[in-house]
Amino acid sequence: MLRDQICSSSELTFLMEAHDGLSAAIAGRAGFKGLWASGLSIACSLGYRDASEASWSQIVDAVERIVDSAKLPVLVDGDGGFGNFNNARLLARKLRQRGAAGVALEDSCFPKINSFIGDRRALADIDEFSGRLRAVKDTVADDLILVARIEALIAGHDMDEAILRAHAYADAGADAILIHSRRTAADEIVAFMRAWQNRLPVVIVPTKYYRTPVSVYRKAHISTVIWANHSMRAAMVAMRQVCDRILAEENTASIEPNIATLEEIFEMFNYNELASAELRYQSPD
Ligand code: SPV
Ligand code: MG
C-alpha cells in the first residue's frame, strides 16, 4: 500500500515514473513497488508541454492506463489541482475512481509550468492552497494519500517560507510533504529535513541533484524518492536513435539486435492468456 510505503515504512521508498501502460508495466517488471504518474512525462507522451496543456481528464485517463497496466500503487502528480479547491477535489475524486493510490498537489497557480522552466514564479497563497488540500481531504478522506508539494525553494523563497508552508499544509490535513529543489546538490533538502523534524514524512524528487547518493536521504530520514522522468527520457533517446538509423540506412537489420522483439511484447502483455480464453469462450460446444 502506498500509505505504508510513504507514511509507515522505515525503509526508503522509491517511486518510478510512468506515463502510459507500457512504461508502467516495465517499471513493475523491473521490481518497483510503486509508481509516480508524472505530469511532465504524461504531457510529453501526449505531445504537450508541462504547462497545464493536458486537461485534467486526459491526466485521469492516462492514470487509468498506468494503474491498470502495472497493478501497483500510483502516486499521481496532480499539479496544483487544475484550479481552485473545487477543481482539486474533483480531480481527486476522479483519480480515486480510476484506482490511484495518492495525489500530490503543488502550491502553484493555474496554469502551472514545470518547476525547472524559468526562475521566479508566483506561489499560491498559503491559505488558499490549504483550502485546496482541505477540500481534497474532505472529499477522498483516507482513500487517497495526499502529498502537499512545496514550490517555495523552486520559486526563490527561503527556508523559513518553505517550513512555514509545510506546517500550514500539515495542519490542512496533508499526509506527507514533498519538498522540491532546483539545486544540483541536496543541501537545501538536508537543511529542510533538519528544520522540519519529520512532523510528516517527506518525499523528494532528485532530478537536479542526481549525484547525491541515496545514503544521504536515508540518513536524513527521507521517506520517499521519486525518479520522476527517467523512463521518458530514456525512451526519447532510444526512439530518436532508431529513427535516425532507419532513415539513414533504409533498412532495419542493424538495429534488430537492439530493439524489443515482438515476442517480448506478446509476453509483456500476456497474449497467451488471450489464446487460452479463446479456447474457453469461443470453442464449439
Ligand atoms: C513531474 O514529474 O511532472 C514533476 C517533477 O512534477 S518535476 O518535473 O521535477 O517538477
Ligand atoms: Mg509535474
Image (tube, helix red, strand yellow):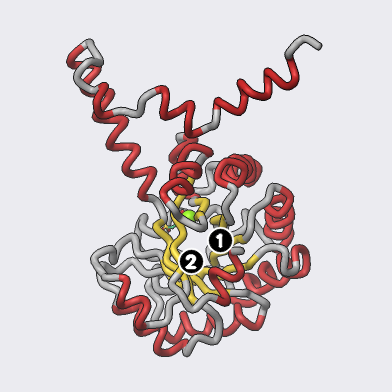
Q: Which quarter of the image is occupied by the N terminus?
A: bottom right
Q: Residue at x 54, y 53 (%)?
A: 111
Above or below 135: residue 24: above
Q: Residue at x 45, y 72 (%)?
A: 179
- Give x and y (percent) for residue 84: 67, 61
Query: Looking at the picture, which amino acid does disc 2 mark?
Result: Ala
- Give x and y (percent) for residue 15: 46, 59
Above or below 233: residue 178: below
Q: Which mark is residue 109?
A: 1
Relative to the observer, which residue lies in front, 15 or 42? 15
User: Rounded to the nearest whole Å, what is the CA distance between mark 1 and mark 2?
Assistant: 7 Å
Q: Which mark is residue 122?
A: 2
Relative to the observer, which residue lies in front, 241 or 158? 241
Label 1 SS: loop
The quadrant of the rendered image in which ligand 1 is seen is bottom left
- Give x and y (percent) for residue 59: 59, 45
Callout 1 environment at 10 Å: few (<14), some (14 to 19), or many (20+)?
some
Label 1 with label 2: CB-CB less than 8 Å = yes
Query: Looking at the picture, which amino acid does disc 1 mark?
Result: Cys
Relative to the observer, which residue lies in front, 30 or 116? 30
Horizontal side of residue 43 vs 96, given as left or right: left
Label 2 SS: loop
The reply to whether residue 215 is in sight is: yes
Q: Which mark is residue 148?
A: none
